[in-house]
Image (tube, rainbow, N blue to C red):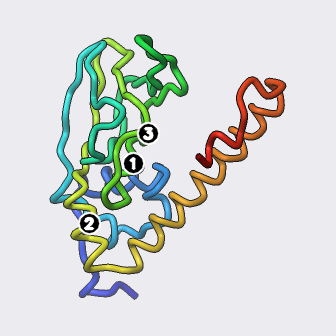
């Protein structure tokens, strides 16, 4: 039996929910929870070699690649060393889910053009402040993401024969 009080979504809203539900950090959320993000989403086009943000910048938004690719790099002296290429359906700038953080890497558009969804930190925090369940689901995803990164870091360290000292991480 159909519920006459159940919210009906437009085709474009359903398309956005479908897209977001496949993106890390959003994949645990129901449509009714994803709906809370719709007013805060901005769509931006970036050109090749355009910097989305630099390391050490304040973490003011989370970014989701709709089309194109973005290189995440770390600054080593005067060069950028690539650490990851982010493509359609993937997210970066994840530390904007946390309060008072700065970027740990630089994001530079690699493709000729990149279409990004941008969700500002203030919009995320408003949702988190009013809905603990959404916050819990997204922070759990963030913790899993960081845990996976730690495993990759330690595996990489083990296979590189210790070219740096891990105790430097805790100084």
**Vertical placement of 147 versus 151: above or below?**
below
Neighbourhood count class around disc 1 (C-alpha, 10 Å): few under 14, some 14–19, many 20 upward: some
Q: Which residue is mark 2?
A: 125
Residue at the front extreme?
171
**Vertical placement of 14 versus 5: above or below?**
above
Relative image position of residue 9 (x, y in whole percent): 24, 65
**Vertical placement of 74 versus 116: above or below?**
above
Relative image position of residue 84 (x, y in whole percent): 53, 27
SS at circle 3: loop
Towards the viewer: 114 or 163: 163
Q: Which residue is mark 3?
A: 89
Q: Which of the two discs, 1 and 3, labels the residue nearer the N terminus?
A: 1
Q: Which residue is mark 1?
A: 19
Q: Which of the two discs, 1 and 2, labels the residue nearer the N terminus?
A: 1
SS at circle 1: helix
CB contact under 8 Å: marks 1 and 3: yes
């Amino acid at each position: 039996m159909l519920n006459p009080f159940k919210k009906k979504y437009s085709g474009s809203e359903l398309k956005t929910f479908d897209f977001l539900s496949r993106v890390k950090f959003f994949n645990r959320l129901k449509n009714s929870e994803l709906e809370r993000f719709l007013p805060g989403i901005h769509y931006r086009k970036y050109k090749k070699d355009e910097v989305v943000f630099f390391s050490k910048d304040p973490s003011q938004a989370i970014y989701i690649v709709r089309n194109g690719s973005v290189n995440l790099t770390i600054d080593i002296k005067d060069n950028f060393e690539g650490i990851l290429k982010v493509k359609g359906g993937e997210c970066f700038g994840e530390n904007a889910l946390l309060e008072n953080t700065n970027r740990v890497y630089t994001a530079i558009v690699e493709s000729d053009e990149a279409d990004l969804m941008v969700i500002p930190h203030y919009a995320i925090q408003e949702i988190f402040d009013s809905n603990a369940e959404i916050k819990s689901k997204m922070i759990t995803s963030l913790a899993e993401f960081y845990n996976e990164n730690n495993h990759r870091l330690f595996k990489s360290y083990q296979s590189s024969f210790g070219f740096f000292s891990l105790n430097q991480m805790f100084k």
